[in-house]
Image: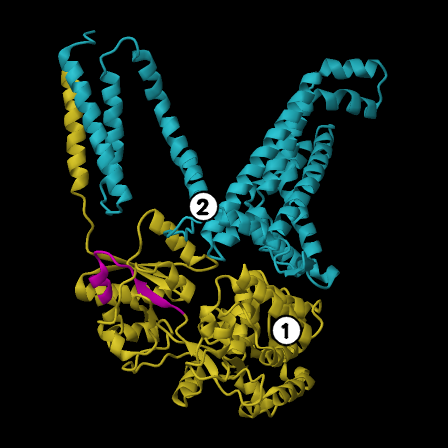
Chain colours: A cyan, B yellow
């Protein structure tokens, strides 16, 4: 292969320079908001030309490395566009007075100080933590019990498995509205006033609906874990005379410790990010007559919904962004700690 | 190898040239916020295309969509519509410097209902809506109550008590359909009912109480207390099944089928009564409807009418075409369809069409007599109803706020906090 031929070198340079030029023009068009319709196509063409130029670049030493980059590029590009760039932009906007359309000035840490002076936001954080702790325990306990039930060889086990999992296939918004109907029109005959109108009972309602939605999913993971326990181990336990509870606590649970890790991790993060059921079931309503000296009017509003409402309903996008950055930090910390602790436990086994 | 590379290069060049030549056809896009008039708007757009060849695409949003948020997404992403709905000062404030001034348009001289913002006349009014205490005229007549006699708190209570005593004979479930549910109907209590504290009985340009509110969220204690007493009266005589966890549909259906003598929704329910609820409305005898003022103080004699929202024109290459379309809409050709098919109450003086709407006659009467007030609640801080006031109405209805005085105190505190944050 004439990798170092003059014409190939030339072609590579043309592609590289042409591609870079197209890229720059496209980006300028974009940032200057000229509204030119061809800018997207130009950007993609520019990138393709640069990649071609790199491919044709006359080098033997780095050729393999260039090929790696070219193959990784689609993934890296997508990851940058959907995760890295929005994250950076979000952090950037949180230091401005962004309205969702434009911003006029940098405000430094004003948004960050403002949110900690807002009792409603502190309340939302508290409620979220309570919700997470309660759910992490209840969802796992209930899911594990359901899994034991379904793997016990009872009649119709397959049916129960499917039935418990079914709620998870319905979207949270739809579920929220279905349960809202149940609470407001059916259960109201027992409870006089709807459970959804008082903060305490409404939180309880959200927890019930969330467990109903999520326990079936976690149950499936436990079932997978339980069915993967080797039969000879269980048989050995039986021969040694272990009773049912001994088998459960001394054999089954230690054998599926890694499943517990996965499930606590899943319930923890998903409960933290709870949004759809919260939005559809209560919309964050509910009053708290006295908290930090204020009368709060969004008692069941959890963190994600608080962020959404700050931006969309209160029309304060910059403050919403700042809260979202804090949300990201909390979630990242919690997840890291959780994984650390669980990993250590597994090693000990 | 070389040939292949040359071919690819030529291909890229050709594609780049082709891409640069792409251009938009003559077409406008309108984002409408009233999903119930979608069909009428599409009809009017088709007629305009027939007459002028300009295609107008109607995009209707509703059913809980936050339209401003949606528009912001379009602004960041796919591009703005040429004409879009804006409903309040905060909405228009979002687009400062980006909207076209329409004071040179022909329609501007034909109405006083346009929206004037910092960029000039930026809002095209397309209909008129009224907030008043809607009543079922047939039932009031049977009960021997003259709606004109309800002029203040005592006469209102007397009328409610008379109706309550004859509930069974009149086939009523409750005297009034008043719903304080806070998740989906916060706007009805927190904005529309609250509007009466701000404006009822005042001249159209009287901004006393909205100015007070804008200045750090202050509430006039005496006026609000009187208003709170009326809210208490509604709580007392409303349908318990509706009061704290009902729905909008349930509320309108109850009124349309003659189960409530009064309902606390404005003139827009006329469209629902004659379409979705037409069957029940017919069964109840297609009764006559009217409105009385929310007379929480003796002498309050106005209902609140306004353009509920406006259409704004975005500044871009299509601005002139968009203005031309709105000019045409304000003429008889456009108004005929909007009024007769969409049930709009025209804000234009030259328009002679009158909708077959149960409330059209009442609104005309009040307007002709000069007994209307404006909607200064449109100046309220964004999200006040959803995040603050709506919930307090519910607490009052539930009884966790026991009386009018406490209601006034809590409301004063919460609104002040909301304006401070």
Q: Is residue A139 magenta?
A: no
| Dot 1 and dot 2 within a common chain | no
Q: Quadrant of residue A144?
A: top right
The chain that hosts pointer 1 is B
Return the residue at label 2.
A95
Q: Are marks 1 and 2 in contact (CB under 8 Å)?
A: no
How far across and down, in percent of the image, does residue A48 sit? 26, 27
The chain that hosts pointer 2 is A
How far across and down, in percent of the image, does residue B309 sit? 39, 68
Of the 4 image quadrants, the one containing the N terminus of chain B is top left
How far across and down, in percent of the image, does residue B269 sit? 48, 73
Marks counted in the figure total: 2
Above or below for A60 versus B411: above
What is the span of residues highlighted in magenta in the rendered image?
B309-323
Disc on res. B408: 1
Left or right: A134 in relation to B389: right
Assess disc 2: are there few (<14), some (14-19) or many (≥20) residues with their C-alpha within 10 Å of its C-alpha.
many
Relative to the observer, which residue lies in front, B330 or B107?
Answer: B107
Of the 4 image quadrants, the one containing the C terminus of chain B is bottom right
Above or below for A252 versus B133: above
Above or below for B315 versus A305: below
Query: Residue B315, can we see it?
Result: yes
Left or right: B408 in relation to A308: right
């Amino acid at each position: 292969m004439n990798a170092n031929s003059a014409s190939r070198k030339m072609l590579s340079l043309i592609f590289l320079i042409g591609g870079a030029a197209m890229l720059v023009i496209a980006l300028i068009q974009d940032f200057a908001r000229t509204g030119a319709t061809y800018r997207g196509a130009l950007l993609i063409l520019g990138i393709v030309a640069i990649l071609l130029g790199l491919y044709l670049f006359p080098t033997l030493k780095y050729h393999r490395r260039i090929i790696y980059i070219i193959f990784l590029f689609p993934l890296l590009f997508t990851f940058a566009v959907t995760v890295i760039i929005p994250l950076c932009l979000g952090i950037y906007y949180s230091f401005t007075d962004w309205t969702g359309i434009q911003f006029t000035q940098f405000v430094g840490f004003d948004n960050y100080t403002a949110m900690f002076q807002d009792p409603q936001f502190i309340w939302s954080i508290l409620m979220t933590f309570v919700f997470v702790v309660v759910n992490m325990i209840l969802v796992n306990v209930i899911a594990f019990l359901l899994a034991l039930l379904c793997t016990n060889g009872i009649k119709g086990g397959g049916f129960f498995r499917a039935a418990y999992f079914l709620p998870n296939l319905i979207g949270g918004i739809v579920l929220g509205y279905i349960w809202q109907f149940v609470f407001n029109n059916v259960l109201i005959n027992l409870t006089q006033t709807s459970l959804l109108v008082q903060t305490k009972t409404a939180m309880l309602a959200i927890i019930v609906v969330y467990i109903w939605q999520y326990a079936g999913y976690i149950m499936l993971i436990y079932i997978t874990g339980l069915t993967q326990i080797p039969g000879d181990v269980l048989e050995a336990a039986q021969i040694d005379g272990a009773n049912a509870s001994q088998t459960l606590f001394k054999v089954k649970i230690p054998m599926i410790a890694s499943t517990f890790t996965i499930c606590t991790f899943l319930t923890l993060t998903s409960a933290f990010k709870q949004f759809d059921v919260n939005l559809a079931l209560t919309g964050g309503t509910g009053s708290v007559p006295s908290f930090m000296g204020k009368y709060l009017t969004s008692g069941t509003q959890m963190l994600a919904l608080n962020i959404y409402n700050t931006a969309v309903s209160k029309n304060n996008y910059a403050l919403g962004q700042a809260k979202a950055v804090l949300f990201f930090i909390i979630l990242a910390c919690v997840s890291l700690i959780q994984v650390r602790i669980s990993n250590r436990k597994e090693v000990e086994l | 190898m070389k040939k292949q590379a040359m071919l690819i290069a030529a291909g890229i060049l050709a594609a780049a040239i082709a891409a640069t030549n792409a251009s938009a056809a003559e077409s406008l896009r309108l984002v409408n916020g009233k999903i119930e008039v979608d069909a009428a708007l599409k009809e009017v757009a088709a007629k305009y295309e027939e007459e002028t060849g300009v295609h107008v695409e109607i995009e209707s949003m509703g059913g809980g969509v936050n339209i401003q948020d949606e528009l912001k997404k379009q602004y960041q992403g796919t591009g703005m519509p040429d004409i879009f709905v804006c409903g309040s000062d905060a909405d228009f404030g979002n687009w400062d410097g980006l909207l076209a001034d329409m004071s040179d348009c022909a329609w501007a001289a034909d109405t006083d209902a346009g929206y004037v913002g910092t960029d000039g006349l930026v809002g095209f009014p397309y209909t008129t809506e009224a907030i008043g205490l809607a009543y079922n005229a047939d039932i009031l007549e049977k009960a021997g109550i003259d709606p004109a006699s309800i002029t203040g708190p005592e006469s209102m209570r007397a009328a409610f008590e008379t109706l309550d005593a004859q509930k069974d004979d009149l086939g009523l479930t409750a005297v009034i359909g008043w719903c304080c549910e806070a998740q989906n109907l916060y706007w009805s209590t927190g904005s529309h009912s609250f509007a009466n504290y701000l404006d009822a009985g005042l001249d159209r340009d009287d901004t006393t109480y909205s100015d007070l509110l804008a200045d750090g969220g202050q509430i006039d204690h005496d006026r609000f207390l009187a208003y709170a007493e009326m809210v208490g009266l509604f709580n007392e005589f409303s349908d318990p099944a509706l009061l704290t966890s009902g729905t909008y549909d349930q509320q309108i259906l109850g009124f349309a089928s003659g189960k409530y003598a009064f309902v606390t929704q404005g003139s827009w329910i006329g469209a629902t009564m004659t379409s979705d609820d037409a069957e029940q409305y017919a069964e109840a005898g297609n009764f006559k409807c009217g409105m009385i003022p929310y007379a929480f103080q003796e002498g309050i004699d106005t209902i609140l009418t306004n353009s509920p929202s406006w259409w704004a024109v975005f500044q871009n290459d299509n601005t002139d075409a968009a203005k031309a379309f709105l000019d045409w809409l304000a003429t008889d050709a456009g108004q005929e369809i909007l009024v007769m098919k969409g049930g709009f109450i025209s804000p234009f003086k030259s328009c002679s069409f009158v909708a077959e709407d149960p409330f059209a006659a009442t609104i005309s009467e009040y307007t002709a007599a000069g007994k209307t007030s404006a909607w200064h609640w449109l100046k309220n801080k964004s999200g006040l109803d959803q995040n603050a006031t709506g919930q307090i109405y519910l607490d009052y209805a539930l009884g966790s706020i026991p009386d009018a005085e406490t209601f006034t105190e809590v409301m004063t505190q919460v609104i002040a906090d909301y304006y401070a944050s």
